[in-house]
Each structure stands twice: as structure tokens, then as C-alpha cells.
Amino acid sequence: MSSKLARGLLATYLRAELPRLVRLTVVLITEIGLQLANPLIAAAFINGAQAGRPTGQLIGIAVVFIGVALVTQLATVAETYMADDLGWRTTNALRVDLTRRVLHLGAPFHSQYSPGQLVERVDGDVSAVADFFSRFIVQVLGNGVFLLGVILVMFVLDWRIGLLMAGFAAAAVVVMTRTGGFVGTRAKAARVAVGNLSGFLEERLAGMVDIKSNGGDGHAIHGLQSHMAERYTRTRTSILAASSFSAGVSLVFVVGTAAALALSAALFRSGGLSLGTTFAVFRYAVMLRVPLEQLSRQMNSLQRASGATVRIRQLLDAQPAVVSGRGVKLGGGALGVEFEQVSFAYGTQPVLEDVSFKVAPGEVLGLAGRTGSGKTTISRLLLRRYDPTAGEVRVGGVDVRQTTFDDLRQRVAVVTQEVQLFEGSLRDNVTVFDDSVSDDRVWEAFSVLGLDRWVQARPGGLDGQLGTFGEGLSAGEAQLVALARAFLADPGVVILDEASSRLDPGTERLLNRAISRLLTSRTGLIIAHRLTALDRADRIVILEAGRVAEAGSRSELAADPTSRFSQLQRLGSQEALA
């Protein structure tokens, strides 16, 4: 089944390269014809020399032989180039499709895999099938045609030799097809081990600072050794299986070649074959080794690719749990937000239960609650990273399931305490590499947010380069970049998820001023632990265990001495519901 998947995947991507495939096929057939012709030309030379033909005729045959050999080499070079070019084109197209699929699948899918595992699927698995994609036409179909051509020529030379070699070739093919699954199963296990190692490394390297600062080096090294041992064991088993497979095919070939040479020698002694024909039989018997060995290697490649193909096919066939809506447009300006009897669970773990609240256009709502109370889940539902299991989430009066992802995420912006920055200029990080955004618009964003002097004070200004993962900016400065990103999108709703939780006083003043300007004439949701972060909120909703525990304006909650909010205010606590 996995081999069929590999061949089906190859056919899918070859269809897009049909003109190149046709040209490769023409070159390949030409090369095969020339290879089959040369032993016959050599046999004619030997028979002519034995019969005492004129030297001029023999020289002519020799020139033809050399000319055919040279053209064969040129055809081989052209075929190799064209096959590799075709392989790279098809595998690169496959990488693009896999990347697009991964980006399309959304949060429910990504929660099941680490980034390292997905990288291994998108690049590692495709690399595993790259040789199969580039050489399948040449080394399977081409060598299959060449093998049939050699056997047919042997039948023409002597039916007994042809019959003998056909039997051994059939035996080799049976060995390859019947024992291939033995290799494929072990190759798939090896690919899984490689993916597990990649996922482990990605996770540990991302958390390197925490691991070292908390003395977790030994645990990380132990885990690395365990994953490396698994990869080594499974890879070694896969290689041994592939070598055993190739050895079995080679044994069939050796026995077949020996039998063919013994038979041709006996026929020569009895006068049934000429010396030139005997030489041709010898050459064709030797030539059979090449297609059989290449077929053997390619069958190995097919079996190694089959495990990767299953994983690739699973990824291509995966369907997103959240799909884009039918395209109802959201309005302009500030947009209202409504949660109506919303419930949600991550798997079997309930997070929100019957949550209802409204935010009027232009109003700022503060969301507070203990860790795990469901605050961040509300922002994820609003952005449709997940869909609620019950109830409705509406933006601008439109159920978010009815609008497109692009429209929703253009009108709803989020700024979190964990900002993803990229290697590139400050401008690139603000525009996320969108060259259509002019410098004037970027400067306008920083200017309106009150951050233009901060940009001017930075080395290089907008063109100043940031290192990998945004080295060169503090956590607070990274949030300033995120605010500028949000302003450029001109959203109707802004979500601030713990956006001021890790700032020094100077940066916090900059950020607070920028937030105030960003929220001007926009609807805001501020998710925070600290009460001071909720000072700009018009109303506050406090969550407990996934339910709305309290809701009202700051003055209403503060006036109620029994409210959780007023209790914390009286205690002077800076931590809300901690």
C-alpha cells in the first residue's frame, strides 16, 4: 500500500511537469537504443575480422562503434541533468504544498506536534523521497525497458540463452517485489526516530536558558542520548535490511550470469554461436547487471521513501478543524464583540462554560482571572484559532464562523507578552516582510503611537538589523514592535494579552502611551493579572473556573465591598486573583 502511495504521489507531481517528462523520456529511449546497439556493432567487428573482411570496412565499423559510444555518453549526461532537474522541481513543489498545508491546519493540529517534528515532515520526509522522485523514471521505468530490450536481443541471438536470462531476470524481479516490505517497514521506523529526535532537539534548544538556569542539563543530555540511541538502532536495522535486500538480488544475478556464460561457451564449442555473437552474449549478460542493480537500489529507495510517503500523504490529507467562513464582511471602524453562552474544551478538558458578555464598539473591556481560568482561550476563540463547542462569538454583529480568516484577522489584532521577531530589519519586523507597505506608513505608525523618537534613537533606525529571534530588542521593545504591527493593520478590535507584564518602568511608560493611542476609537480587550493593567478598562469581567464570576464597570465593582475586585483593591494587591 505504501509503495502505491509513493507512486501515486510521484504521478501527481509529474503531471505538472509533463513537457519536461516527455523530453526526458525521448532522451532516455535514445540512450537505451544506443546502449543496446553497441554490443551488436562490436560483434559485427569481431565476426568481420574473423572472416577476413577488408580493413576499410573494419575501420568503418570501429568508427560507428566509437561514435555510438560518444553519443551514448552525451545522452547519459543529458538524461542525468534532466532527471535531477525534474526531481528538484517536483520535490520543491511538494515542499511548498506541505508548508501551505501546515500553515492552513491551524491551532488544533499544531498542538499535536512540535515545530521540530513538523520541520522533519516538511523537509526531512521530502528529502527521503527526493532520490525516488528524481531517479524513478530513469532507474525503474528506464531500466525496466532496458532489461526487456536486452532479453529480446538475447532471444534474437539464441532463444535458449534468451529463455535462460528471462528466467533469472524474472526471479530477480520476484525477489525485489516480494521482499520490499521487509525494507519499507524498517525504513519507516527509522524516519519516525529521526522525527522524534528533531522534535526533542527543537524543544530543548528553545528552552535552553531555563534548562541551564534550573540545572536541567543532565536530564536534557540523558534524553538526547536516549533519542540518539533509538535513531541509531532503527537506522542500523534499516540499513542492514536494505543491504540484505541488495545482496539477494545480486546473488540471483551472479547465478544467472554464470549460467548464461556456461551455455554460450557450450554453444560456441558446438558451432551454434559465432565468436562475435558469443562476445555479444557476454556483453549483454554483463550489461544486465546494471539495470538489475539499479532496479534493486531504486526498490530500496522506494521502500525507504514509502514510509516518508505515508507521513507526507497523511499531512496532505489532513483537514483543518477550523475552516474559513463563507465571506460575510465585517464592517469598518470600531467593532462590537459578543460572547453568547460560549463553552469550550481542549479535548476532554473543559475550559469555558456558558460564558456571556458584550463589548460595545469603542469600549475597552478588562478580563481578569487566575491562570487557567480561560482568559487567553477567549482571545483564541475570537481569532478563530479554535471554534467554541457551544454558543456563538460575534464581531460587529457577525458570527466569526461566517467571515473569512483574512477578514477576521485583519479586523482583529492581538498583542501578547511573547512577541515573535525575525532576523531582518526593524522595518521588516513591523511589516512582517511586506514590501508593499511604504516607509511613510511605518513612520506614521510609530509617530501616532509616540514611538518615533525611540526608533530614531536606535542604530540604523528602521533599517537597523535584528539578529535571529530578534536579538537587539528587549522583551518590552519587542512589544512596541507588536503594537506598531497592530496599528498598521488598522483593526477594529485590539486584544492585549498580558502585553505589559514584563517591562522596565521606562519602556512601560512608552508602551502605555502607545496602547492608549492604539485603543483610540477602537474596541479593546485587555487580558491581565495585574489590577494596574486594567486602569484603562471601561468594564471588567472576572473569570473563575471558566465562568463569569463578576462583571461590571470599575466603579460598580469597587463600590461593592463583597466583590473580589474591591477586596483586592483594599489589600493594595498588584496581582489580580493571584
Image (tube, rainbow, N blue to C red):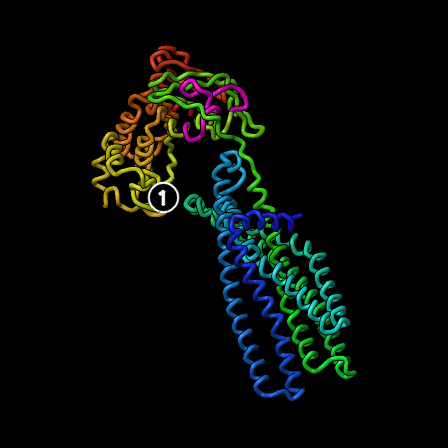
Q: Relative to the observer, which residue lies in front, 371 or 397?
A: 397
Specify whether 301 is left or right of 510: right
Q: Residues within 10 Å of mark 1 (few under 14, many from 20)?
A: some
Q: Secondary structure at mark 1?
A: loop
Q: Is residue 263 in view?
A: yes
Specify whether 544 is left or right of 167: left
**Residue 380 screen position, x and y as percent:** 45, 28
**Residue 105 screen position, x and y as percent:** 51, 36
Tell me, yes or no, whether the highlighted magenta stretch contains residue 402.
yes
Specify whether 172 is left or right of 354: right
Q: Which residues are magenta?
A: 388-407
The type of residue carrying mark 1 is Phe
Label total for image: 1
Rendered position, 549 above or below 14: above
Which quarter of the picture shows residue 147?
A: bottom right
Rendered position, 414 above or below 283: above
At a point 72% along the width and 73% down the height, the residue shown is 157
Which quarter of the picture shows residue 349?
A: top right
**Residue 527 screen position, x and y as percent:** 39, 25
Figure quadrant of the C terminus: top left
Rendered position, 251 above or below 13: below
At a point 52% along the width and 45% down the height, the residue shown is 117
**Residue 191 screen position, x and y as percent:** 58, 51
Which quarter of the picture shows residue 26?
A: bottom right
Mark 1 lies on residue: 422
Specify whether 442 is left or right of 367: left
Q: Is residue 573 in view?
A: no
Tell me, yes or no, whether the highlighted magenta stretch contains residue 93.
no
